[in-house]
Amino acid sequence: MAARSLLAWALALSLAVILGHARQARRLATLGVADEFGRRQLLEERARIARELHDVVAHHMSVIAVQAASAPYRVEGGVSEAAAREFAAINAAARESLRDMRHVLGALRGSDDAPRTAPQPGLGDLGGLVESVRRAGVPVELTVAEPAPPLSPVESVTVYRIVQEALSNVVRHAPGARTAVTVRADGDTVIVEAENERPARAAGPAQPGAGLGLVGMRERVAALGGELTAAATDRGGFAVRARLPKGDGE
């Protein structure tokens, strides 16, 4: 009888240990999947930022290449042979820079395909963005200080993406909450603020990747040497505030 009791106790202990190890293994596997999902989302966001930067810079580099190639024919009276060689060198350097950018972006995308450039949204497109969010049931008030801050193309698309992600978070996590978006200049910086009140109704369960939008915003702001804060307010809402060093608007 004692031997049977001892055997039963040993079997029960072994079963408990096995179940404990199984639960721990499942937990570690779940954490590993979540961590991998987060890394993948972050890499995708960085690749999107790289594509947008490419689109902005590629436009200006293309203009430089075309102007350098055509300058000798547009200058009245022609140019010297040395000046023509200089313009040709500028054209070649601009084209080589474009090729290098495409190769770097292809590496970021994990592909050798040349990226497709496309017009990127900016400060002037915020009105349409806000209107689409209003149609989704979120009352948004947009204020862009007059005169509008002079922004470079990269700064302009960064402002747009910050506001876009902030409003997307309101739609997901604070449906129906009144929201105020402000863009203004403050000395040598541009201030972007998006603050929503307490949500009118409870949001649904958190979706996979929740919080990665804030990571993307921080990546964009950090790329320009700026600062970003995102935190709950004392009134039960949420506020996003970014400070971007202001360029010369070129």
Image (tube, grey):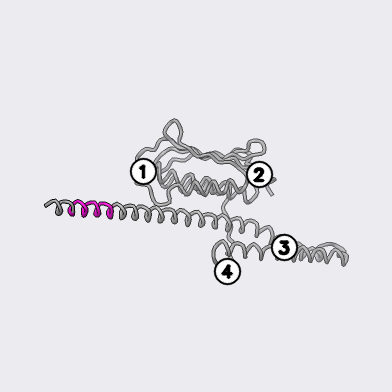
Residue at disc 3, secondary structure: helix
> What residue occupies the far front of the structure in this picture?
2
Say what amino acid the circle numbered 1 marks. Answer: Ala
**Residue nearest the viewer, comparing 186 with 28:** 28
Residue at disc 1, secondary structure: loop
What residue is shown at x 74% (from left), y 63% (from top)? 93
Q: Residues within 10 Å of mark 4 (few under 14, many from 20)?
A: few
The reply to whether residue 194 is in sight is no
Using the rendered view, name the quadrant where residue 182 is placed.
top right
* Residue 148 image point, x, y percent: 62, 41
Q: Earlier in the sequence, mark 1 or mark 4?
A: 4
**Residue nearest the viewer, comparing 77 with 247:** 247
**Quick check: 110 left or right of 98?**
left
**Quick check: 90 left or right of 13?**
right
Please give the residue where the numbered disc 4 appears in the rendered image: 112
Please give the residue where the numbered disc 2 appears in the rendered image: 150
Q: Earlier in the sequence, mark 1 or mark 2?
A: 2
* Residue 222 image point, x, y percent: 59, 46
For the residues labelled 3 and 1, the Cα–Cα distance comes to 50 Å
The reply to whether residue 27 is in sight is yes
Say what amino acid the circle numbered 3 marks. Answer: Ala
Please give the residue where the numbered disc 1 appears in the rendered image: 203
